[in-house]
Image (spheres, rainbow, N blue to C red):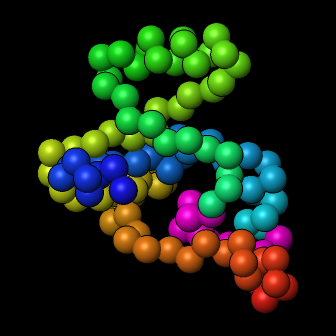
């Protein structure tokens, strides 16, 4: 995990995380929690840490290649890991179950 490797904390804004319609459909169909939704692998997402001073340049460069970029949070000197949803700060979950296996096996 990037925060652990860099000895930093972070704050993520849940509402800024792009969640495609297919993922929303999986969440509704299988009653997944937000934590399970965030833990799902194979969502086609790449997480990149970018210096805020060059964020605009990186976004422009990605756009030239047809890729969208979203700023969803920031690393912090304080080692707390926070997720903000509906204006409320909560501790970011340390672990979460990736529900794909249970979905595919019919267990969910």
| Residue at (65% x, 24% y) in the render | 67
Residue 91 is situated, as x and y percent measured from the top left of the image, at: 33, 66
Residue 68 is situated, as x and y percent measured from the top left of the image, at: 63, 26
Left-right relation of 36 to 86: right
Residue 8 is situated, as x and y percent measured from the top left of the image, at: 21, 50
Question: Is residue 17 among what the camera can see?
Answer: yes
Left-right relation of 81 to 72: left
**Residue 4 vs residue 85, the one in the foreground:** 4
Give, as a single range, the part of the protein colored magenta.
29-40
Left-right relation of 103 to 13: right
Q: How many labels does the image show?
A: 0
State the residue lying farthest toward the left. 78
State the residue lying farthest toward the bottom. 107
Quarter of the image for the N terminus: give it: bottom left
| Residue at (54% x, 13% y) in the render | 61
Q: In this view, does 50 lie above or below 13?
A: above
| Residue at (43% x, 74% y) in the render | 95
User: Residue 31, located in which quarter of the rendered image?
Assistant: bottom right
Q: Is the magenta stretch mostly helix, strand or loop?
A: helix
**Residue 6 vs residue 96, the one in the foreground:** 6
| Residue at (68% x, 52% y) in the render | 43
**Residue 10 vs residue 44, the one in the foreground:** 44
Quarter of the image for the C terminus: give it: bottom right
Residue 59 is situated, as x and y percent measured from the top left of the image, at: 52, 18
Q: Does the magenta stretch include residue 69?
A: no
Question: Is residue 31 among what the camera can see?
Answer: no
């Amino acid at each position: 995990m990037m925060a652990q490797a860099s000895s930093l904390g972070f704050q993520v804004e849940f509402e800024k995380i792009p969640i495609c319609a297919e993922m929303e459909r999986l969440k509704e169909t299988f009653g997944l929690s937000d934590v399970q939704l965030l833990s799902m692998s194979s969502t086609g997402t790449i997480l990149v840490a970018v210096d805020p001073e060059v964020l605009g340049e990186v976004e422009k460069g990605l756009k030239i290649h047809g890729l969208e970029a979203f700023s969803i949070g920031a690393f912090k000197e304080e080692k707390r890991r926070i997720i903000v949803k509906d204006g409320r700060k909560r501790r970011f979950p340390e672990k979460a179950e990736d529900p794909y296996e249970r979905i595919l096996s019919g267990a969910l």
